[in-house]
Image (cartoon, helix red, strand yellow):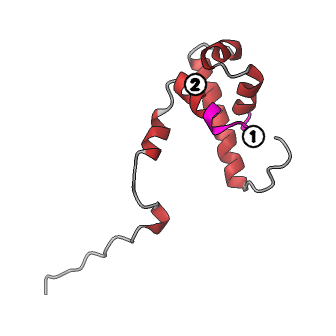
């Protein structure tokens, strides 16, 4: 990974690695080479390779373009279409109160 991303936590780095692996598996499952994916997305194959390695310097636009090309965008669409309060800010569920007394 490139230097200059010292602000990334281990959890973020692991997530980037897992995302890169998922993208690589999706590309290979569709029997696409990096060159073929480059033709589809118009993103240079070296950038695509960096994305598959979990490089945090790849733009979010590039990431989304690749996910769309691989028909893997639905998880992201689900995430951004939910206008909910973030999980950590939600109120805890009310405890069940036994009113049988």
Residue extending furthest left? Answer: 101
Instruction: Point out the image quarter for the C terminus.
Output: bottom left
Q: Nearer the viewer, residue 61 or 53?
A: 61
Instruction: Point out the image quarter for the N terminus.
Output: top right
**Which sits earlier in the primary sequence, circle 2 or circle 1?**
2
Q: Nearer the viewer, residue 63 or 101?
A: 63
Residue extending furthest bottom? Answer: 101
Is 44 located above or below residue 2 in the figure?
Answer: above
Residue 44 vs residue 100: left or right? right
Is 43 located above or below residue 16 in the figure?
Answer: above
Determine the secondary structure under disc 2. helix
Query: Which residue carries the number 2 mark?
Result: 26
Is 2 located above or below residue 49 in the figure?
Answer: below
Residue 15 position in % (x across, y down): 65, 46
Q: Nearer the viewer, mark 2 or mark 1?
A: 1
Is 46 located above or below residue 99 in the figure?
Answer: above
Q: Residue at x 67, y 53 (%)?
A: 11
> Which region of the structure is painted magenta?
53-62
Q: Residue at x 45, y 34 (%)?
A: 74
Which of the 4 image quadrants contains residue 90? Answer: bottom left
Kindly identify which numbered label has been placed on residue 96. Answer: none
Q: Nearer the viewer, residue 65 or 98?
A: 65
Residue 65 position in % (x across, y down): 58, 28
Query: Which residue carries the number 1 mark?
Result: 57
Determine the secondary structure under disc 1. loop
Q: Residue at x 50, y 32 (%)?
A: 73
Residue 84 vs residue 7: left or right? left
Q: CA distance from mark 2 to mark 1?
A: 21 Å
């Amino acid at each position: 990974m490139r230097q200059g991303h010292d602000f990334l936590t281990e959890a973020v780095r692991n997530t980037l690695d897992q995302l890169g692996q998922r993208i690589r598996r999706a590309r290979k499952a569709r029997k696409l080479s990096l060159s073929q994916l480059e033709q589809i997305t118009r993103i240079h194959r070296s950038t695509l390779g960096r994305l598959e390695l979990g490089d945090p310097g790849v733009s979010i636009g590039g990431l989304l373009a690749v996910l769309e090309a691989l028909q893997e965008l639905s998880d992201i669409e689900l995430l951004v279409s939910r206008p909910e309060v973030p999980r950590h800010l939600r109120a805890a569920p009310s405890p069940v109160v036994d009113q049988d007394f």
